[in-house]
Structure formats: C-alpha cells, structure tokens
Image (tube, helix red, strand yellow):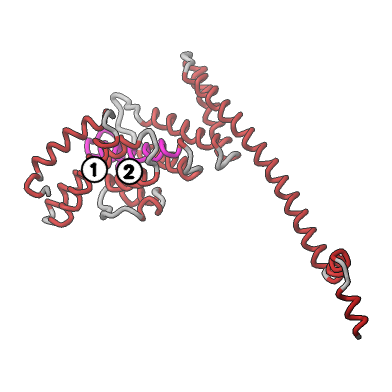
Amino acid sequence: MHKAHSTETQMGFGDKLAQFIQKNRVLIFSVTIIIIVGLVVFLVWATISEQISKTSTQKAEELQERYEKWKNEYDTEKNAQYKQELVGFIESVINDYPHTLACQRALITRFYLTREDALIIKQDEEKEDKSSAWLSMLSDMLLVVETNPNSYLAEMSLYNAGVIIEEIAYYQKEGTYALEAITLDKVRELIAKLFLDTYQYEVEELDDTALALYMYFSENYKEAVDYPHVLFSTARLLETKLDQAKQKGDNELALQIVKQIRDIYLELEMDFEKNDWTKIAKNRNIMLKIQEGDEEE
C-alpha cells in the first residue's frame, strides 16, 4: 500500500492532466464544439453586420442624392417623376434596413415630404382633412428615436416631435387646417409609454404630450445642440401649466411649477449665457418675478 501511494504522489502534472482529460473527454469535447460554433456564429454575424452597415451608408448617400435631384428639378413632369421614385426608394430603405442610419434618414426624408404636402392650402377649395399627414409626421419622428435613441438624429427628431404636437394644437385652435381627426388619445397612442412615465403632471391636452417629450429630452440629451432651445420650450409650456393651476386654485402645484420654471431659467443663464434662447428667457424670467414676486424666496 505504501508503494502504491508513493507512485500516485509522484505523478507529474502532465499525467494528471491526461487523466483529467480522459475522465472528462465528453464534457471537454462538448464545450470545445460550443466554443467553435459560437466563434463561427460571431464571425458570420460580424461580417453580415459590417456588410449591412456599409450598404446602409451607401443607401443613405443615395437617398440624399435622390432628394437633391428631386428638389432641384424645376420641370413639372420630371419633378413629379423624381418624387414618385424617391417615395418608393424611401419605403424600400425603411423596410429593408431597419435599425440603421439609412432607415433614420429615410424616415426624416419622408417627414419632410409629408410636411411639404401637408402645409399646402389650395385656394377656393374646401379644406382637405390633413389629420393623417400630421399623425404620419409625428409617427416618423418617433420612429427615428426608436430606431437608434443614441444618435444625433434621434435628438433632433424627438424635439421635432414635440414641435409637431404644438403645431397641431395651434392649427386646431386657429382652424388653419382641418385636423379634427387628431385627438389627445390618438397622440398618446403614438407616444411610447417611456416618454410619459417620467412626466409629473396630468395629461389633459395635446401640449401636455409635447411638454412630456421636452422634459424627457432635457433629462436624456443634455449635450444636444438643441438642449437650450428645449429648456426654453419646456419653461414656456410650464408657464401655461402654471396658469391652469392658478385657475383651478391649486396653489401647491402652482408653487411647484414656479420653482421648476425658475430653475430652468437659472440653468440657461448660468450655463448658456450667450445663447439666443437665454436672452429671451431672461425677459420672461423678469416677468415671472414681477408676477410671482410675493411668492419668491
């Protein structure tokens, strides 16, 4: 027994490794196959992703070329032909290259085309209902954000979505366009729950959904070029909420909103002193202090 024990203790690392491999050869073989298959799948995925990215970039460039070709064509028949071809190309890019830069650019281009048609008012004709066009514009801007929330195109499109909602509310009030089919419920259906989850006020009208988008923007895109403009737009709509709170006699809510507006104006003055929107904000802040002076700490 002593002799056997001595032999076992004298086994080298190589012998022990060989013994381990022999005992666990099935497991080792399975793990090796999994690693190889995983590596192959990764390499195939990386190759395909690179190709999609390359093709997407090419499609984005072609999209811009087609847009400029249509925009710069003054012959009526050719212009109509180029526009029809552009619309078809946009649809193909959106369907074939989802979640890419090309898809985002296609959605934005479609937004511009739709907006141009929607803003046309034909003389001496009964107002055409433009509700579907405006809802389509809003949907396209929100889809750009959904496609890639971290891109600069998402920042721009989220802000544009808020502007579209404000425009809809304004045009409905003024009767500029026939937009009767656009309701608060329909707009809320388009806006992802994500944008409303952090909204701290009751959603009572269209401008509330625009405010929700601006507030989400100001929390998530602080480095964006449009950030100061969004801050100003947020404060502007909060002033409307302040008036509503006062009309309801909700003094606690009014005080909360006043503080929030002042914080925004202070941020603009402190961090964006030379920005054009800050100049306007300073004047509005002075008016706010005059109106709420007795409540200011």
Q: Is residue 26 left or right of residue 87?
A: right
Q: Mark 2 belongs to which amino acid?
A: Tyr
The residue shown at (64%, 38%) is: 52
**Dot 1 corresponds to which residue?**
237
Q: Quadrant of residue 116?
A: top left
Query: Does the stretch in magenta take in 144?
Result: no
- The correct choice, above or below, for 265 with respect to 88 in the image is below
Q: Quadrant of residue 58?
A: top right
Front residue of 186/2: it is 2
The residue shown at (41%, 51%) is: 192
Point out the residue furthest to the left here. Answer: 294
Q: Mark 1 belongs to which amino acid?
A: Leu
Q: Main secondary structure of the magenta part?
A: helix
Front residue of 257/179: it is 257
Q: Is residue 129 left or right of residue 107?
A: left
* Disc with the residue nearer the chain's start (1 vs 2): 2
Say whether marks 1 and 2 touch (CB < 8 Å). Answer: yes
State how far apart marks 1 and 2 are (Cα): 10 Å
**Dot 2 corresponds to which residue?**
214
The percent coordinates of residue 155 (x first, y second) are 41, 38
The residue shown at (26%, 40%) is: 267
The span shown in magenta is 154-182
Q: Is residue 177 left or right of residue 224?
A: left
Secondary structure beneath dot 2 equals helix
The percent coordinates of residue 262 (x first, y second) are 20, 44
Q: Quadrant of residue 207?
A: top left
Front residue of 263/129: it is 263
Point out the residue furthest to the bottom here. Answer: 1
Image quadrant holding the N terminus, namely bottom right
- The correct choice, above or below, for 119 with respect to 20 in the image is above
Q: Is residue 236 visible?
A: no
